[in-house]
Image: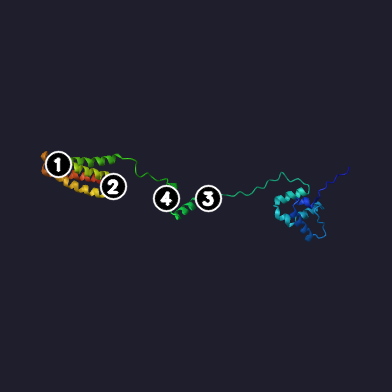
Amino acid sequence: MGAIMQDNSKTIGEICGGEAKTIAAVQKFLLGTFPDTRRGKGVRKSEKDVEVVLSAPALSRSMSDTEKEMKRGKAMGVAPNEDAAPIYPKPISINIKQEADDIVDMWQSFLAANGDNNRYADTEKTPDNATETAPQGRTFLEYLLGGIVLGHAFLIWYDCAAQWDTPGIIGGCLAFCIVLAALLLAADKTRVRTSDTALWFVALVDCLAVFVHYPTFSDNARIGDIQTWVLSVFLASVSWVALYLFRDYNQD
């Protein structure tokens, strides 16, 4: 029983996929390389001739190795090797974090160059070891220091009233108000220069208050004059130091 021979020959047009430019390039290649070879579009080529046609530069430049192998097998009537491992493109390694940091640096440099860096100041990173500085609201220490200042101011008011009756009440009220104003200025972080001026004026008020405290204390004293003077100076000093600490705590 004779074996049936399979015809694996293909025309040049079939080998080139019917592309006119490729066919013309292959024909030109065959003319220069094999001038005696038939070069018509419908000329059928054997398996050996197919190899020659596929070696033409026009096909070599337009096909990768895998495509050339598949086209060669198709031209020869041979099915491609399906069991062969597929060829995948080599993955590109990209450091996303590094790329993002580079973009942020470029953007910040652009903003700094254009004088618009403060607009995005809230996007800057906060260090992990950063601590909160100013507490929200008033603390017990501030109330304590403020109470000492106002307590001494009220004592000045009382001494003036005890020594000079109605004029003393008015004068003592004015002294109390000026100390209260200095305390409020010391609590304002934006009034640095004004609060500093008020602080030193209150120092003058406290120094003069010593001479108001002494007569009042002497009228009710059961100790000597020296102790009374010391007590008067001490109370005035405590009041001014309390105001100084209150202002320094708020302005820091």
- Residue on which the image places disc 4: 118
- Residue on which the image places disc 2: 248
Badge nearest the viewer, 4 or 2: 4
- Decide which of tag 1 and tag 2 comes sooner along the chain: 1
Marks 4 and 2 close (CB-CB < 8 Å): no
Task: Tell me the SS state at disc 3.
Answer: helix
Horizontal and vertical percent for residue 78? 77, 46
Residue lying at 19% horizontally and 41% vertically, measured from the top left: 173
Horizontal and vertical percent for residue 198? 24, 48
Query: How many residues crowd mark 4 within 10 Å: few (<14), some (14–19), many (20+)?
Result: few
Task: Tell me the SS state at disc 1.
Answer: helix
- Decide which of tag 3 and tag 2 comes sooner along the chain: 3
Horizontal and vertical percent for residue 132? 37, 44
- Which label is found at residue 99? 3
- Which label is found at residue 168? 1
Q: CA distance from mark 1 to mark 2?
A: 32 Å
Q: Is residue 161 above or below residue 24?
A: above
Task: Tell me the SS state at disc 4.
Answer: helix
Badge nearest the viewer, 1 or 3: 1
- Decide which of tag 1 and tag 3 comes sooner along the chain: 3
Badge nearest the viewer, 1 or 2: 1
Could you tell me the amino acid type at mark 4?
Asn
Residue lying at 78% horizontally and 57% vertically, measured from the top left: 27
- Decide which of tag 3 and tag 4 comes sooner along the chain: 3
